[in-house]
Amino acid sequence: MLLKKIARSLGSAAFASLFTAVSALGQVDQGRFVGHVADPQGSAVVNAAISATNLDTNITQTAKTDENGDYVITSVVTGNYTVKVAAQGFEGAVTQRIEVQVAQIVRQDFSLRIGSTSETIEVSTTAPLLSTDSATVGQVITNKQLTELPINGRGFYRLASLTPGAALLPPTGNSLAIRPEVVNGNVISGIRGSATSFLLDGNDVSEQHQGGTFIQTSIDALQEFSVQQSPYSAEYNRGGAFFNATVKSGTNRFHGGLFEFLRNEKFDARNFFSPTRAILKRNQFGASLGGPLFIPKFYSGRDRTFFFVNYEGQRLRNGLVVNVIVPSDAQRSGNFGAKRITDPQTGLQFTNNTIPTNRLSSQALAIQQYIPRQNTSSGTFAAVPSQAIDFDQYIVRLDHQVTDKNRLFARWVYVTNHEVDPNNAPALGTANLSSIGQDVAVGLITNIGATMVNEIRSHFLPSHVRLQAFLQGPDFNAKFGIAGLSETLRDGKSSFPDYSFSGYSPIQGSTFDQRPKSQDRKAWEISDNFTILKGKQSIKMGTLVRYYQWLGYDSQIYAGSFGFSGSASGDAYADFLLGLPNTGSRAFPAINFGGQVWSKQFYVQDDIRLGRLTLNLGVRYEYTPWLNGYKGQVGTFDPSQSKPIIVSGDGTVPDLTAQPAAPTAYQFFGQYIQTTAQAKLPKNATYTDKTQFGPRIGLAYSLDNKTVIRAGFGMFYEPEGTSGRVNLNTLPFRLAETVAQTQFSGPNVKTLADYYQGSKLGSTTANPTLSPTRLYLNMGTNIHYSLNIQRQFSNHDVLEIGYVGNRGVHLNGTNDINIPTPTTGTASVQSRRPYQPWGNITYNTQDVTNHYDSLQTKYEHRFHGGFSLLTAYTYSKTLQYNQASALGGNSAYEYALAAYDVPHNLAMSGQYELPFGRGRKMLGNANGFLDSFIGGWQVQGIVILRSGTPFTPVVSGDVAKTGVGSQRPNLNPAGGSASFRKSLTKWFDTSRYVVAPTGTYGNVRANTQRSDMFRQYDASVFKNFSLPGESILSFRAEFFNVSNTTSFAAPNATIDATAGGQVSATSVNPRSIQLALKYRF
């Protein structure tokens, strides 16, 4: 069946590429030469021969001018070129060392003199600074910047922060659950990190599950990369922001190098909140080699076949800064000092606010042994547990010029990672993680005559992740005396449960990223791109077919999770000691779940040159159905009947073999379930959005030779993430329940010892949670638009200023539709839900909207005279409509600042080679001995200053009595404290807010407070030693946060907690020093 599907898909793709004027992912990693050839009077020179020769490989590409004197050379790989022109009756002309950067359109015009073709004049030129033929907004990070700017961790993506509109924010999700090779924290011009695409050699290596990529290529393997935030060519798909990188290729000369980067905590400063310096021992080492493929006495690949290989390894022992809010020793014994603690049985205050010993829960006291004790004066537990990471990456690339019209390339990347992760609670020990990712890519470029080029590419991208749980094995619930959770064990084994306390830090075992778990992904693509050059037009057409599969298993909350809000006594930890949770959750563990999908994409792009004006006109169509659930594990919900609708197994019953929970769940809830066949719905429970047309319009108009006005508009579609619809979301495959209580006295009160009171998971007395998909969903769309002006001041200086906007519509999100009605009475939470017998029903939706507007400026001094400078400043605002369960799902009320809003963002970077030593301006005639001391010095620096991100004040208790946490306070009518001064213990004035009346939601809007600004100052110093054979040995010292400036993370946002408003973490690591030795030849 799979082979038949592949054949059908390839057949339809071939048909589409032959009979429709459309195309897909094309030469997005390669550049293009364009230009105009004129005679001394400015008239077009027709049929002039143009050649572009790569100086590294000696491979030549040719073209001829058309009836307008224009020429285009496509599929130009990055590198330096000599461009020549020859025409009958004119002297020849040549331009030396023209650089082509990734995905760059380079204009090179010629004005010929009448004379003999045997005479050739050299045209002086510099690297183009203006983008005269494209409206794309972005920034190329050159090889010199890549390999010389100080980059903490050597992750090339970090240099994206130097681009206008880009901010590298902390990854979303659990800090240890996000792997080092997965990067999803880049927000680029309002486009969320999960929608950012990563292209490697023109192939999409993005991670669809949660954003980012597993293929984080070694810096020493990259030629260069660009950040493109408005690529208005229709050949680009996905969300509209791209990292576009190319791997180095071999040349006619052997080249390569060796490197070793070392870090040790002895050179580092102490974290502001840590009692000692964090353990840090990092070794990053590697080697690369490239050149012509040479087999003695058999084959010489000079001018034809080239190879490049690269290896990089990392051995890291890293101290993670832990600074968590924990109860004091007095609180652990039940004494809460001046804070009022109420006896929930009587409603009266406990004497001296101390819980009697005989009222302390034995279960809580047993669990408390795993909760760390305070060890700082600020009432926190601080530690620096060590995380171990072993990382290896291998890259092999081959390039072969088959004939003068055919060029072939193949590339393989293989990445392995093994970790040992610590828990914030030392008593919970460590847990292992291992991952493997690879990408295999091939491509063939064929020139058909002088005016047509065809390119076909394919790549395969598999990855695997395995995560172990903390304290995996023992049944801790049985050990603690907690009933109701034994039936959820996996193979008779369990792990440590999860306990959360409003105003205090949680302690997490299995629910720490729902371990143990695994994730397996596969992506396969084939694309064809056909280019026709016709007069003033360059037309591209083709197609792309993609298959994606994601499968995983995880433990859900099989060991149990209990939440304590302070609703019983006035303090969450006091509730814990009394054994009175306000919520309890449990679920069956899960085996394989996930989804797969085939998608087809087409586009047409027409670039039209009209004198000083270039128009980029295109349209893209993407046919991407919603993911099919593995073994039918996906469903929707019918509110009119209060019934889930599940994908059919045999037509009347879902596939009950898909999950261990399914038979039990269907036994109890089968009467409520209908199948997609019975409801006459599509097999994946969601109708395919067939409206994914993406128009692209761009223009570039040259006012003169130094000024260009550019504008563009484009629609981009985000791929479906697998953490939503197919992430084990509904009955009968996921059997989970969250039971809440608001009454803490009386005969039926639920205690930690017997919270479920004998009911079995899935019994009719339980109320399982659902996370269905909606029946009608639109694919997430980013509508991007820009207007800017570029002005060149010299051959090396350019200023760019403009407006960039983005409107995201139909973005993925969630919406809880089964929130209980708030009350001041005693009715149970469940009885007040609109849909019975269900607990929380969290719809996976596509109804989030955001709106981004910005002023973006950039000044660039290209490297010249030993100096370069890049400065980018962005002033922006990002608003978002979002669902908020703490406000009863009132999305209109939630039109507020987005959590990733960064109004001010300044990024500067520079490189300076000191003018001393042989061949320099000063002491240029120094002898070798003197030059070894004074020559070869250079310095680099990066400065990033940006606003902090916003956060929302919340209250600790369940004020509205809905079982929903993180509810909002009211604004205090009397205002805040007149004497308030911001400090680390009170970052914001908590007295400006008051707890809302019982049975109501607070009136505070989302994200009304803001964390500390982000400040990063990095620098490096190199000493380069020239060696025989044009080799260089470089000694480097790199300083990250060189000034040891502390930038603070967001504070505790719970206004009525003991630690409300308190800051306990930093957003920038303390000063660290890295030493390196690098040899290149």
Image (cartoon, helix red, strand yellow):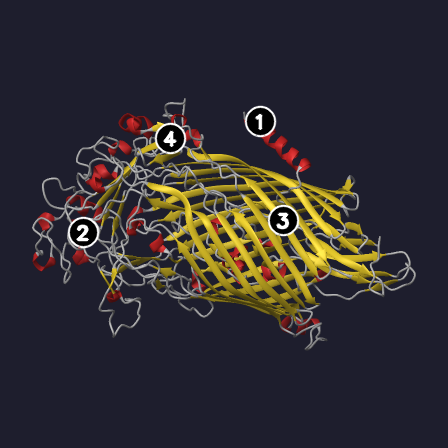
| Badge 1: residue crowd in 10 Å (few <14, some 14–19, many ≥20) | few
Q: Position of residue 369 (x, y in %)?
A: 22, 48
Please state which amino acid type lies under the numbered disc 2.
Ser
Q: Which residue is under mark 1?
A: 3
Whole-percent x, y for residue 970 in the image: 25, 60
Would residue 164 appear left or right of 319 to someone viewing this image?
Answer: right
Name the quadrant of the N terminus: top right
The answer to which of marks 4 and 1 sits earlier in the sequence is: 1
Identify the secondary structure beneath mark 4: strand
Residue 815: x and y, percent?
Answer: 35, 45
Tell me the residue at 41%/49% (across/down).
848
Location of residue 886 with respect to 838 vertically, above or below? below
Dots 1 and 3: beta carbons under 8 Å?
no
User: Which amino acid does the dot numbered 4 rest on?
Assistant: Ile
Whichever of labels 2 and 1 marks the residue nearer the N terminus, that label is 1
Q: What type is the residue that disc 3 sits on? A: Gly
Q: Residues within 10 Å of mark 2 (few under 14, many from 20)?
A: many
Residue 1018 in view, yes or no: no
Q: CA distance from mark 3 to mark 2?
A: 58 Å
Residue hosting label 2: 567
Q: Position of residue 211 (x, y in %)?
A: 48, 47
Query: What separation in Å lies between label 2 and label 4 (alpha carbons)?
Result: 37 Å
Q: Are marks 4 and 1 in contact (CB under 8 Å)?
A: no
- Residue at image mark 3: 618
**Which comes before the other along the chain, label 3 or label 2?**
2
| Circle 2 SS class | loop
Q: Residue furthest front?
A: 640
User: Circle 4 is placed at which residue position?
Assistant: 646
The answer to whether the residue labelled 3 contacts the one labelled 4, judged by CB atoms less than 8 Å apart, is: no
Q: Quadrant of residue 738?
A: top left
